Image (cartoon, rainbow, N blue to C red):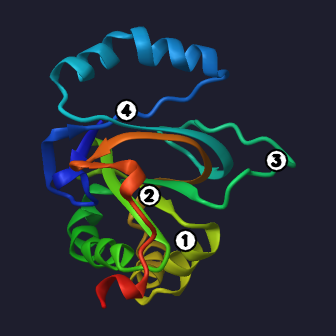
């Protein structure tokens, strides 16, 4: 999939950053793909940095291209509080201008939200199929951003009232492994945002 500018949540495409999201029934098949598949060899040949996250679905609702891509087990307790989130929406073409005029303020607010670690915008179809991948210190800080920050909560309200999407999906994950470099920094260096960061 393509990526937003500088790998961030941005509607402008960035031809230097690319993403791939895969789902697997077991880790052995996943490992085989990431070591030996043509797409991954292609990425490694041309790439200057790589950022890989292994995830386990904790909850998911909605569809991606008419399918439920993430299988969620029952009664599973994650080992850590840090979580990853994927939100994906197919935007109606007649709602694109209205969506574009609103989405930037939500992305800007996310970067300033307590507990935010990092985010990237990706999509398989520029402008119309948009997905955001983000990492948060814990579920509470993610929910505070989603439902209590004015800009994002307002956009959720507008989305429902004005029916911007023909399809959407929200999924939450435990982070099992986190390796590599993202935008020139080792991912191990990314820390949760706090108000004191700007003081």
Disc 3 vs disc 2: Cβ atoms closer than 8 Å?
no
Marked residue nearer the N-terminal end (3 or 4): 4
State the CA–CA distance, disc 4 to disc 2.
15 Å
Q: Is residue 178 left or right of residue 102?
A: right
Marked residue nearer the N-terminal end (1 or 3): 3
**Picture quarter with the N terminus:** top left
State the CA–CA distance, disc 3 to disc 4.
26 Å
State the CA–CA distance, disc 2 to disc 1.
9 Å
Disc 1 marks which residue?
142
Disc 1 vs disc 3: Cβ atoms closer than 8 Å?
no
Disc 2 vs disc 1: Cβ atoms closer than 8 Å?
yes
Q: Work out whether 70 lies above or below 23.
A: below
Q: Residue 20 shows which numbered tag?
A: 4
What is the crowding at mark 4: few (fewer than 14 residues within 10 Å), some, or many (at least 20)? few
Disc 2 marks which residue?
134
State the CA–CA distance, disc 3 to disc 2.
21 Å
Q: Position of residue 28 (x, y in %)?
A: 62, 15
């Amino acid at each position: 999939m393509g990526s937003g500018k500088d790998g961030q949540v941005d509607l402008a495409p960035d031809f230097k950053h690319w993403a791939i999201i895969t789902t697997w029934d077991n880790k052995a098949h996943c490992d085989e793909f990431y070591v030996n598949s043509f797409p991954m060899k292609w990425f490694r040949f041309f790439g200057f940095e790589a950022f890989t996250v292994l995830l386990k679905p904790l909850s998911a609702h909605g569809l991606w291209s008419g399918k439920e891509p993430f299988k969620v087990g029952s009664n599973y307790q994650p080992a850590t509080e840090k979580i990853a989130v994927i939100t994906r929406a197919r935007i109606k073409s007649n709602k694109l201008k209205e969506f574009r005029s609103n989405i930037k303020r939500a992305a800007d607010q996310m970067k300033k939200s307590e507990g935010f670690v990092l985010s990237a915008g990706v999509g398989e179809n520029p402008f119309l199929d948009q997905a955001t991948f983000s990492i948060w210190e814990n579920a509470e800080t993610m929910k505070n951003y989603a439902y209590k920050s004015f800009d994002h909560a307002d956009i959720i309200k507008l989305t429902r009232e004005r029916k911007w999407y023909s399809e959407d999906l929200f999924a939450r994950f435990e982070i099992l492994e986190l390796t590599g470099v993202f935008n020139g920094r080792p991912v191990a260096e990314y820390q949760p945002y706090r108000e004191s960061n700007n003081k």
